[in-house]
Amino acid sequence: MASSMGARDSDGQLEFTLEVPFPSQREASIAVQSLFPDREPRKGGITKTLSVSANILSVKWTAEEARILRVSVGSFLYHLSLVMETMDAFGRIVQQ
């Protein structure tokens, strides 16, 4: 798992990027589909973008405040761990 925390961008926003490798593209796609419906509860102050490239799930946050960013990333990591535990409980995905 790789992550990077950038300083404030030109607009004064904080950025955080997380890349999570999965054993296959299918598992990465299942994870993003499971996590995508969870929108940020705040209407403003933070944005989260999810994408999949090959077997890598990428997430990028942009926030106005460090506190909001910290809460959002923490919540996402919790939900990601639940998704990964669920996939482990059901076993490896068989490619069709």
Image (cartoon, helix red, strand yellow):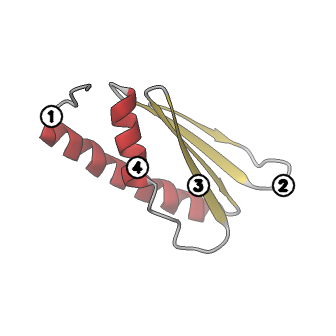
Going by the numbered disc 2, the residue's amino acid type is Asp
Q: Alpha carbon of mark 2 to alpha carbon of mark 4: how far? A: 30 Å
Q: Earlier in the sequence, mark 1 or mark 3?
A: 3
Q: Earlier in the sequence, mark 2 or mark 4?
A: 2
For label 2, the SS is loop
Q: Alpha carbon of mark 2 to alpha carbon of mark 3: how far? A: 16 Å
Going by the numbered disc 3, the residue's amino acid type is Lys
Which of the two discs, 1 and 3, sits closer to the camera? 1
Q: Is residue 77 above or below residue 58?
A: below
Q: Are marks 1 and 3 in contact (CB under 8 Å)?
A: no
For label 3, the SS is strand
Q: Are marks 4 and 3 in contact (CB under 8 Å)?
A: no
Which residue corresponds to mark 2? Answer: 11
Which residue corresponds to mark 1? Answer: 91
Q: Are marks 2 and 4 in contact (CB under 8 Å)?
A: no
Q: Report the quarter where the N terminus lies.
A: top left
Q: State the image coordinates of residue 28 (x, y, percent, origin top left).
A: 39, 36
* Nearer the observer, 3 or 84: 84
Which of the two discs, 2 and 4, sits closer to the camera? 4
For label 1, the SS is loop
Which residue corresponds to mark 3? Answer: 48
Which residue corresponds to mark 4? Answer: 33
